[in-house]
Image (cartoon, rainbow, N blue to C red):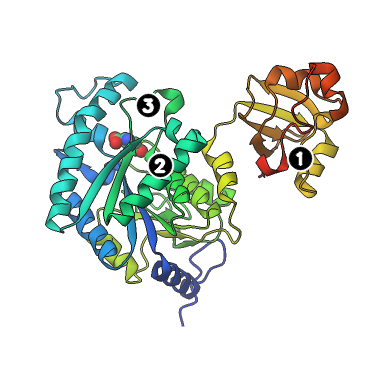
Amino acid sequence: MNTRIDNVQEISHEEGLFLRQSYFDKAKRIVVKVGSAVLTDEHGIDSNVISNIARDLSFLKNSGREVLLVSSGAVAAGKRKVTITDNEKLGLVEKQALAAIGQPSLMQSYVEAFDKCEQRVAQVLLTHGDLQNRDRYLRVRNTLLALFRFDTIPILNENDTVAVEELRFGDNDTLAALIANLIDADMFICLTDVVGLYTANPQTDPAAKPVYTVREVTKEIEAMAGNVKSSLGTGGMQSKIRAAKIVATGSGSSFIGPGKKDSILQHLFSGEMIGTFFLPSAEKTKPRKQWIEHVLRPKGKLVLDKGASSAIMKRGCSLLPSGIVEVHGTFGVGDAVQCLDGDKNIIATGLINYNSSDVQRIKQHHSDDIEKILGVKDYDEIIHRDNLVIL
Ligand code: GLU
């Protein structure tokens, strides 16, 4: 029997194969992300790749699964349409313009390819701002689920043209992971131009081994991202592993592997050991807490004393003003802020009940004194335990 250990986390080849197959077999709702490096060649959008994706996704859909595609390639497609010299430096505005040029032809290629498979698709363009607002976040979910009911494959991309810095996801790996959690996907499949994770750089180290199964995204696994290089796209391997980590907390599994391989999804679903597979966390973070932790961007930091750190971490308590030692940043009521312990480790993130100048005034005071200090008291807690995610 083959007992080769493929993984730094002590998963034998057999166990990895078994786990992988069981997750692929039961995956009913799947988010597939395809990167620019897979979709384009030197002439622009590679129609063979698009046809391959359309066939593969239609195959999954026809086997009774719900499928959503997150596709990059708008900027890359736009670049091939205008005359720009190789050494011309493209700023954000130019990339936003190129995305506007490339997105329609990207979609046109998809519509033509999916038409051949008699599969309907829809275009959804999002900015980070659309997910940051809880109400809009839930509306995006409703729309995507309605598209599934209409037997349609939604094709998402970042709305690059309007996404200024603070509204950007930055890379589609993050967008895809957040969407996977938003729609409770069972699996996130990230198709890229690398074959998967390696224990060391395979170009320079002959002892480098492929990592087929990851039980948990640890620092060691994150460090392995540096062993593989991708040519195009924004995120690189780091953002793909971060994406797998986000999806794991929502109880989804993830796969990172070679997107140009013919019929890759059909190979995968029939049990071939390709790429790297990430198992979900044993415990699922509650949906609202996933949104607080992964979608919201912290606007400030609170440094807590020992008592408060231990009360929120070990006893599941709310954060009270008396335990706050330092306040950093400018934030308003309802913003996300990070909580740090005395050693400046981030231990929690949560939605705050007071703005930064009020927290400055009431820190290290008892909740009974809030009214005396501020003239009004809306809450005893600075962050209520229901709005606090322990990291
Ligand atoms: N939204 C970008 C595009 O369509 C791609 C971002 C990424 O590479 O992750 O070109």
Amino acid type assigned to the residue bearing label 2 in the image? Val
* Count of labels in the image: 3
Q: Earlier in the sequence, mark 1 or mark 3?
A: 3
Check contact, mark 1 vs mark 3: CB within 8 A: no
Badge 3: residue crowd in 10 Å (few <14, some 14–19, many ≥20): some
Tell me if residue 359 can be seen: yes
Q: Is residue 262 above or below residue 354?
A: below
- Say which residue appears at 48% left-offset and 55% top-offset: 199
Residue 262: horizontal and vertical position, in percent?
22, 60
Q: Which residue is mark 2?
A: 140
Residue 317: horizontal and vertical position, in percent?
78, 44
Amino acid type assigned to the residue bearing label 3 in the image? Ala
Q: Is residue 227 above or below residue 185?
A: above
Q: Which residue is mark 1?
A: 318
Residue 360: horizontal and vertical position, in percent?
76, 19
Q: Left of 10 or right of it: where is 22?
A: left
Measure how far apart labels 1 and 3 are at the Cα level: 35 Å
Tell me which corner region of the image, top left, top right, bottom left or bottom right, holds residue 91: top left
Q: Viewer-nearest of labels 1 and 3? A: 1
Element assignment for label 1: loop
Q: Earlier in the sequence, mark 2 or mark 3?
A: 2
- Say which residue appears at 31% left-offset and 40% top-offset: 124
